[in-house]
Image (cartoon, coloured by chain):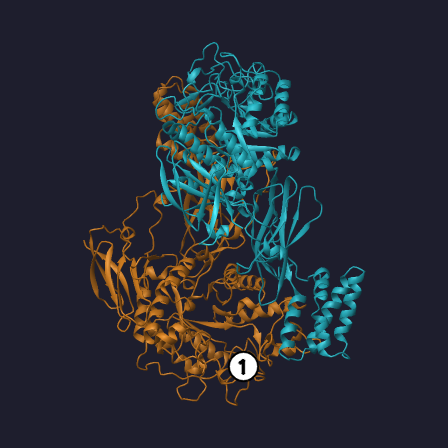
Chain colours: A cyan, B orange
């Protein structure tokens, strides 16, 4: 992050002897950290070279949160790249890491290599031996007292000893032990440091692998017509745990505004029993740090969180920075809002439309510090009550720099906090929010339904540079988004989208009702649900016929069993003759980089998955696939078994070209695990 | 270059309200300047946005050499890009320019647009009119005394005047004059500045467009067996001017070492009359600031330079930082060299090979400052004698940071100095030297002979990011490089390479002998010439039968007449059915960006060239071409004339698909100018 040397050289300054360029991973010249997960091995690459033909050496230095010393890991030439170097280190703690690159001339290695060549060519190397003695003696003088120092001193003397033959001295000079001693003790005179220190934000594992479920707790009562409570919602937790979800996301749980409350189906006037939109936050019972009394108390909420935890799940809260007309802040801090010339506060509008149930905050008001601190304290309030995951509503309508500040503030205290951006906005804005610190982001997935759209979009998401900082969470639907693909395609379409969401990326989610294939829009062409749960309580029979529970349970079980489905950047698309049948591979975790370990490349590990999905929910199709056999280590004439993890069926395939047929009425796709014979 | 705000936001600091990202042109995060030519219009692009829906405004600010104030040019939304903005400014002076980007909320425009929508929807806008009055009054208070200030004050009063109807007040609020006044006078409260200031190095025009000719002055005597002088070389200048060359490049003109001098064909021992390699610099007559007495005096050289200037040409000197065993520096400054343990100096070697006629300098010796200053002073010595172009020998074998320093030192005093890097090394090293300040670079052109290699390589060279900082100079041959393509292909191959070099990029060059199709290698497979001019004097009959003088003269005349051949980044390749026939377009200079001028796109100007070259020197081929008619503004059924500027022949073509046949025995290619009817 820090630029440590000036851009322009002057003759008197401490000039870099080597060139170090293009250090990766890096985001916007080090302005933002890239993201990784705890336990990840960070692969560092750089271009390192200098004038002439000397041998070079290089290392990455890195530092975890609270480390006061740099650690180092070697960089070695990357066989595939001109002047490219590669290395890696593990990030084993949550928080902010920093790394940089250093390189220097391998003076001893260069001398050793030249000596070897000259001696082999029968040249006189008297002068070379003296040069080497000089180098070794100098290293000995700077070495710590001990064995090495003494050994080096003796070797230097030996190389100068003209009573010995050149052959004897050369033999001592080329001894592998000497090379090792020199590698350890040599202090380079031309150590060159890359001018940038680069940042890595390391999240806990669940930030990168989780199945989400969005649940309105008020819709969980067991008696029709009643308003659900946290206690009611608790009774749904075993079902959700059984389905295999990891995160239960609740829309805002705060008191809901009365004034200008919206009625059913977004009616301008609410009926007396209409509960209102939970995103119109605040009434006489409190604002963002209060709980809607109809749901229960804060203690009830805490109990809910604990129950979820007992079942291995965590609760995500909605963080929506806007206020109903009845929010306490309007009275306590009218200066945090936009004030009209007549002294009244401004409600939200997108002229000529008016949203009189919502008052936006003025992030650049005079008391900016007071407002920003209050917004931060909302996070801290819930964090203190055990919440570590926040789904942030519409962050793109609030000051960008506020997010960078508040996320850092919260993560300084609770580094395990996950922020999930609901930034349904233009691409560069969505990406900037990810750069500024959001842990995950909603994506355009709901609007990418054809195979070609999915290929293009998911390749962008799952590949650097985007994958270095933005983690897409593939929601199939939300209370705001019922895509036409689901409306028209019905149950098979839901199965297609579930399978895609859960296998393309390690993060995905559904909003309740999805498992019942609910797909009635407010009106034709609308993405709003009819009788949207945003404005009314919706009781559901989650065991109703046609439900997708078995699909979901199976999918989540496969996700937990298969490391390939827990990784983000391991997605590659492959050819199928019939284009609407999507064919992709999720690669198993790679072995350590061979170059670093100095070992030969191990066999391709078991665990690669080949996934085939028929994106046409209406018709059965068959196709030939081009299996990436080279990547799988399969010979072109080799037979192997692919096991469908969804059904348990096994098929024998051979070589690259193989056949599938998918009838959406029966099965929308396969998740094949590859088994080789012998 | 300067990072003006800290990476991480804190609540109390001066926070950016807007996001400004991805400002271009930019090289390595602003670490190095990009390059442009005097008179170029620099197109600046940026991504600019903020939260919400406010209208924004933005500008580029820029500063030329010695300017003490910023100038500004507007940025406007780029219709083609989400959140992309574009603008331009002209760099009209040689030297270092700096630019940055600023943006802010267009508060008045936003208010105006919302007022318009609300009023059109029949809403009450009393509050909005008061808000506008506030904004206008505040602007008036900050405006300079004068007409604008008074007008703005009156308008603010008018908008507050409840005796007028809302319609009357809205009409005043929407007046275009008011908008213009506000655009001029408004001082934004949220001006956001891109944190980097980016650099542009601007060269004189010849740095970007020139035909070079390499000449050994010692080979210019009129009597066989004699050593040529500057006076002899002067007699060649009218011939070279007539052929249309712009730069005459001389290999080193300094005294040549005697000790270990190389003989003919690089023999280890020289005969008594062998002149030696001019790159073994220095003897009792002096070193890098002296002239070989056999060539004449410094005054003779100055006269040569003046004569060239009279003919519109300039002289480039070779700058080769290495010394013969007899160079005065070995005695005066032995500490500038590598010293062996026995106190002797080290000659060059690439073990087990030895180069005993050459002593390399130690750029990191203790007296580094003394050595570097002496190296700089060599440049200054010749600059004072009228030389402004240096061909730098093997820069990749000297400390990279030295070049950044010395080029800046020289250009501080002589900003019109051109440095041409002979960096035949790995790609990243070649590119780094360009980033560090070299004006031009040799390329791998001599080794790119097939059509597919040329397409790929020239696309890389002529496109950003590489074209932003590295200017390739396409030499067809050098004293070190006689490519097999020329050896095997003979005269037609020479004609092919000449045409390619002179039309693919605006910078090209030949080494003398090329015009006589000299192609006898030292031995089969060698890239060295037999009887290389590096080691002996070579007299030539430049009017010998089979010479390429007519080709060269015509090519250089066409290059001078056609602006399309004087530009660098205007090269695009197009399809020919027969792949070895290379087909490319050089586009005429573009009109000013329509977006900036607010004008509609003018008609495609005349002047685009379509170039067809048969890269097979042995056989005639015919092919159909896909003419890029859309880019040329030609309809698919339209007839047009293409005029071959090399021969004057005219052909009528129609639509996109057209036919050519090229017989290398007769004509290796066409340079077509497109003429539309009516």
When the figure is inspected, residue B119 is found, relative to residue B531, above or below; the finding is above
Looking at the picture, tell me which residue is in the foreground, B73 or A305: A305
Looking at the picture, tell me which residue is in the foreground, A649 or B465: A649
**Residue B150 in view in this figure:** no
Where's residue A14, x and y in %?
Answer: 65, 59
Where's residue B141, x and y in %?
Answer: 48, 30
Circle 1 crowding by C-alpha within 10 Å: few under 14, some 14–19, many from 20: many
When the figure is inspected, residue B508 is found, relative to residue B529, above or below; the finding is above
Dividing the picture into quadrants, the one containing residue A127 is bottom right
Looking at the picture, tell me which residue is in the foreground, B575 or A427: B575
Left or right, A158 with reference to A474: right
Where's residue B467, x and y in %?
Answer: 44, 57
Dividing the picture into quadrants, the one containing residue B488 is bottom left
Please report, as a chain letter, where disc 1 is located. B
Disc 1 designates what residue?
B256
Left or right, B573 with reference to A363: left
Q: How many marks?
A: 1
Where's residue A327, x and y in %?
Answer: 55, 18
Dividing the picture into quadrants, the one containing residue A177 is bottom right
**Residue B358 in view in this figure:** yes
When the figure is inspected, residue B339 is found, relative to residue B455, above or below; the finding is below
Give SS at disc 1: loop
């Amino acid at each position: 992050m820090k630029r440590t040397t000036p851009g322009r050289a002057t003759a008197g300054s401490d000039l870099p002897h080597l060139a170090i360029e293009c250090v990766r991973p890096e985001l916007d010249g080090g302005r933002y950290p890239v993201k990784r997960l705890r336990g990840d091995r960070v692969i560092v690459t750089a271009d390192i070279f200098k004038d002439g033909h000397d041998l070079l050496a290089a290392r990455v230095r890195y530092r975890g949160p609270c480390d006061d010393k740099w650690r180092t890991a070697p960089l070695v030439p990357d066989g595939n790249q001109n002047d490219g170097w590669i290395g890696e280190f593990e990030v084993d703690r949550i928080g902010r890491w920093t790394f940089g690159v250093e390189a220097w001339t391998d003076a001893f290695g260069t001398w050793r290599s030249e000596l070897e060549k000259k001696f082999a060519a029968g040249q006189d190397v008297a002068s070379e031996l003296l040069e080497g003695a000089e180098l070794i003696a100098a290293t000995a003088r700077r070495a710590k007292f001990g064995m090495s120092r003494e050994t080096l001193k003796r070797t230097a003397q030996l190389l100068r000893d003209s009573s010995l033959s050149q052959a004897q001295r050369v033999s001592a000079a080329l001894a592998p032990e000497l090379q090792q001693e020199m590698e350890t003790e040599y202090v380079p005179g031309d150590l060159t440091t890359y001018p940038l220190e680069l940042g890595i934000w390391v999240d806990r594992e669940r930030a990168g692998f989780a199945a989400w479920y969005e649940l309105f707790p008020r819709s969980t009562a067991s008696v029709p017509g009643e308003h659900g409570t946290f206690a009611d919602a608790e009774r749904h937790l075993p079902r959700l745990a059984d389905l295999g979800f990891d995160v239960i996301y609740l829309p805002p749980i705060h008191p809901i505004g009365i004034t200008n409350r919206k009625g059913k189906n977004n009616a301008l006037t609410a009926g007396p029993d209409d509960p209102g939109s939970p995103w119109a936050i605040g009434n006489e019972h409190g604002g963002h740090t209060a709980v809607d009394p109809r749901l229960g108390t804060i203690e009830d909420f805490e109990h809910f969180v604990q129950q979820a935890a007992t079942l291995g799940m965590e609760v995500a809260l909605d963080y929506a920075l806007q206020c109903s007309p009845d929010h306490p802040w309007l009275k306590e801090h009218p200066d945090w809002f936009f004030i009209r010339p007549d002294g009244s506060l401004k409600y939200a509008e997108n002229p000529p439309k008016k949203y009189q149930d919502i008052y936006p905050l003025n992030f650049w008001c005079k008391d900016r510090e007071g407002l920003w601190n209050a917004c931060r304290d909302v996070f801290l309030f819930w964090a203190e009550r055990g919440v570590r995951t926040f789904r942030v509503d519409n962050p793109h309508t609030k000051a960008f720099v506020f997010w960078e500040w508040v996320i850092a503030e919260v993560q300084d205290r609770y580094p395990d906090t996950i922020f999930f951006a609901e930034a349904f906005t233009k691409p560069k804005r969505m990406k900037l929010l990810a750069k500024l610190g959001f842990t995950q982001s909603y994506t355009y997935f709901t609007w990418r339904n054809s195979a070609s759209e999915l290929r293009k979009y998911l390749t962008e998401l799952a590949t650097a540079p985007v994958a270095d900082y933005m983690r897409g969470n593939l929601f199939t639907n939300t209370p705001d988004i019922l895509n036409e693909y689901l409306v028209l395609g019905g149950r098979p379409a839901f199965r297609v989208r579930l399978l895609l969401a859960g296998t393309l990326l390690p993060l995905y989610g559904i909003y309740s009702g999805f498992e019942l294939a609910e797909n009635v829009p407010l009106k034709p062409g609308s993405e709003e649900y009819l009788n949207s749960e945003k404005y009314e309580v919706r009781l559901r029979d989650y065991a109703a016929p046609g439900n997708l529970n078995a699909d979901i349970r199976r999918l989540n079980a496969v996700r937990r069993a298969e490391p390939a489905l827990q990784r983000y950047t391991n997605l590659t698309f492959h050819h199928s003759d019939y284009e609407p049948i999507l064919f992709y591979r999720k690669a198993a975790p790679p072995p350590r980089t061979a170059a670093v370990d100095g070992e030969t490349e191990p066999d391709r590990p078991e665990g690669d998955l080949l996934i085939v999905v028929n994106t046409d929910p209406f018709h059965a199709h068959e196709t030939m696939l081009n299996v990436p056999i080279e990547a799988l280590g399969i010979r072109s004439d080799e037979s192997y078994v692919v096991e469908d993890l969804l059904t348990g069926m096994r098929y024998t395939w051979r070589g690259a070209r193989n056949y599938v047929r998918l009838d959406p009425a029966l099965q929308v796709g396969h998740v094949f695990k590859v088994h080789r014979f012998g």
